[in-house]
Image (cartoon, rainbow, N blue to C red):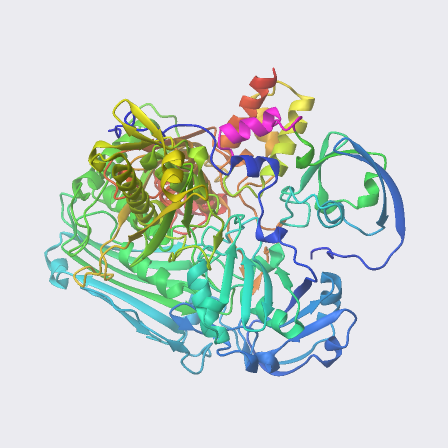
Amino acid sequence: MTAERNIYRTIGSGGPRVDAAEKVTGRAIYSTDIDRPGMLHAKILRSNVAHAKLVKIDASKARAAPGVHAVLTRDELDQVNSPVYGYFIKDQPIVAMDRVRYEGDTLAAVAAETEAQAEAALALINVELEELPSVPDLDAALDGSLPELFEEAPMGIVPKYGAGASGALRPIHNACYLFSYTTGSAAAFDGCDHVFEDTFEFSRMHHLHLEPFVTVAETSGEQIEIWTSGQNPFPLRKELSRVFGMPENRITVHTPYIGGGFGAKNNCKTEPVAILLSKMAGRPVRLSLTVEENFLTNTQHAARLIVKTGVMNDGRFVARESTIYLDSGAYSDASPLVAEKAGYRIPGPYRWDYIQTDCYCMMTNTSPAGPFRGFGGTQTTWASESQIDMIARRLDMDPIDIRKKNLLKLGDPFVPGESGMDSDLAYGLDLVAKEIGYGDKDRPANRGVGLSIGFKDGGGVNKPALARVKVATGGDALLQCGTAEIGQGAKTAMSRVVAEILKLDPARVTFAPINTDHTPFDQGTNASSAITVMGQAVERAAHKVRDEILEFAATQLGIAAEKLDLADGMIVNGEEKHPLNLMVMGYYGGTGFEFSADGYFKSPNDHEAPLESPCVFWEIGWGAVEVEVDPDTGRLTVHKLVVSGDAGAAIHPLVCRGQDEGAAVMGLGQALFETMQYDGTVLTNGTALGYRVPLASDIPASFVSITQEQGHGPGPFGSKGMGEGGMLPVASAIANAVEDAVSVRITSLPITPQKILKALREKA
Amino acid sequence: MSSPNIVSAGEEIEITVTLNGETKTLAVPAHQVLADLLREQLGLKGGNVSCASGVCGSCTILADGEPVAACAQFAYQMDGKTLTTVEGLGENGQLSAVQKAFSEHSAFQCGYCTPGMILLATALLEQNPAPTRDEIRTWMSANICRCTGYEMIIEAVELAAGESA
């Protein structure tokens, strides 16, 4: 099942990524590299208490400290239109107003000539806090006797949902949001031969993007200009416009290369503080967080997932009712969106008669949780694919058979009103099962294999994208599009789409720097959406500009445009080739010309689709592992990890492979050891040294990734998005393999030797 | 805690280093961190600082051929040493064998760790021109890459070793 590739010049070929030369020589510019004349440096004063009333904050001594140009406390918030920001719910203050809500919450900020002076001045700020009982985790959040993090309801909205879906603000005590989805009738449970209810705990990771959250802000008069490590420049501009009460056309967001994000670099992070300090100081201000501060800025969602599944004796799935609690931390950030996705994805890619889900965003006095690669899909795949294995074993069925019996088929809608599956799920499952040697009878003792199918709707919801392709006199192309290069290879993929359509060497396509003044609108680099959403806009722009060029040439040559082709900057008419530049100069004169066309794409709005527009593509991550458990110590060794995604068509095969492998290793870390550890509300490993991430030495002895090209994607040339799928199946595949190996089931992450040993002892 | 970007006080120490092939005598404040000397004072911003605590290796440079974390060394400690940053790799505008392998094998994604990874691999191949896969894996475990999952980095080092063999 391979897409026809030999028909293409560029698509599917090898060769360096377009950002290779800059990145291997160190010439690539990140926001951390930006230096503006007269630039000041900012530091943030953070709360050392998790939950407290802010009684008094006095920064007068700090204001007089050497080198200090501006100090921001709640007293300066009258300079903004709105002192709070957020996605659906505007609850996070630029600096604390009446309360602090987690250890690390922003109390004040200083801009000074040097970071050292700014840091020294922070120590001079006098803060008086009146401690409140804290809400450290989900259990505490669900305990009605503990205080609400927000006494008053923050301003918030529930977006429009389609068939079966709904949302609610502050549905229960200490919850900021509830997403619910229902299809079918609850009576379906009555006819089930078996109903199983299981609870799964999902741990919380930090993105550990190597480039910190960083902003350089330069304000002058009624103009804001920022260079920032953010993956959604246009939504950021809109939120800053609301916060600062300035029209969007007076805010310029530059997006240099981003040094990793994995979801974190969304919406306001360092931007409002840097901008406000710059306004106060009248100088450019750089705010670059430390790795320790990154931990205090955004994290993954820990979660509890209670999944009740009704099945028939023969293994047919009938009904699934799920209650999910996400630990949203102290501010809502993207939690409502993550709830939407977790609540929507928990059924997995299977046929059901009845689905009912409630997903709550619970507030706790911990770091705010937000988008993280997989975005709800990691949590739900962990629970769903674990439980499916458990059910198979309870029914004495083979876990691969129960999956294949219930999997949606190519073209089947996920739920009523949705788009159809655009991958053959069983094909992918067989592929990874074969690679892992599934069904091998002579496996040594204490070894086992496990499978999993990670599942998410990809491409974001209701995302518009615009792109512009300009072709200059000589036929060289400039692509303007707002997809940020965050490592995923967007510049390479988009440039190749243009190169293929214009029949140009990819080296003749330049991806213009992203700057919201010049770049056409894009809703953001998220949800693995680049190639299927922006890719379609780029594709349309490239076709349009090609048509314009051919029409121009047709007029010049007196030949119908349909008879002409464009290749390598030449107009091709059968055997004849006419250089475009001569033709352009013949008509426009020696000053030349530029052809330019815009492309637009958005999945159409549709109220029949639960999320108001049908899913753009389905992102699937098939995983298989072979593990060994030492029964004496609980030590778990992953001997082999197989991961596979469906690129639809691989525009750059090595880039696709890198997405699956990078995501899989993040999943491996989550499965085995990587987790933010809290002692109550205190994060105890929030440092580079304390927080363990996978290293090269953690890669299993055999690590195989298989890039499928099933050819059904909506993106250019049949492509699909790739960024997240590989992360999804790893943890559940490992838990399933552990049960296969030693007949114990671990339902909480990470799967540590301690947990395995405890389970083995309980079983014995 | 990160180091200050501009240092205002403290004793100055004169050091002589050979930096990317050029001998330089520099007066450095006693508490200046090497990464700040390179990035802020000398404008060599190719290497990136991430953890600022000697853990992640993003800022790795070579000092007398040995990989060091520039964020966790004082500038004065480099006195008399030969330093190589990513800017000093390759000759006559050509990429080094390791840079070429990383480029051709797409052994990077966001690129933030890449200069450090390339210098780390350069040091390995200098000391051990034909490393085994296990030796590469162990050596390259000094640095963190959050994007690639390492496999393609390991393969790029194998390719570079094959190239220079």
As rendered, which of A23 and A511 lies closer to the eye?
A511
- Residue A707 falls left or right of residue A96: left
Say whether residue A104 is visible.
no
Which quarter of the rendering shows the N terminus of chain A?
top left
Residue A702 visible: yes
Residue at horizontal 53 percent and vertical 55 percent from the top: A229
Residue sitting at 38 percent across and 72 percent down?
Answer: A175
The one of A100 and A737 positioned closer to us in this rendering: A100
Is A412 colored magenta in this rendering? Answer: no
Q: Is residue A81 above or below residue A354?
A: below
Q: Quadrant of residue A390?
A: top left
Residue B99 on the magenta span: yes
Relative image position of residue A597 (x, y in whole percent): 33, 49
Q: Nearer the viewer, residue A404 or A463?
A: A463
**For the image shown, how many numbered marks are present on the structure?**
0
Going by the image, does B119 lie left or right of A300?
right
State which region is magenta.
B90-107
Q: Position of residue A174 (x, y in %)?
A: 41, 74
Q: What x and y, as percent, mark residue A129?
A: 62, 80
- Residue located farthest toward the top when viewing the structure as drawn: B165
Tell me if residue A95 comes above or below residue B134 in the rendering.
below
Tell me if residue A339 comes above or below residue A433 in the rendering.
below
Q: Looking at this view, is A734 or A190 the one in front?
A: A734
Is residue A105 rendered to the left or right of residue A601?
A: right
Image quadrant for the C terminus of chain A?
top left
Rendered residue at 58%/47% (across/down):
A29
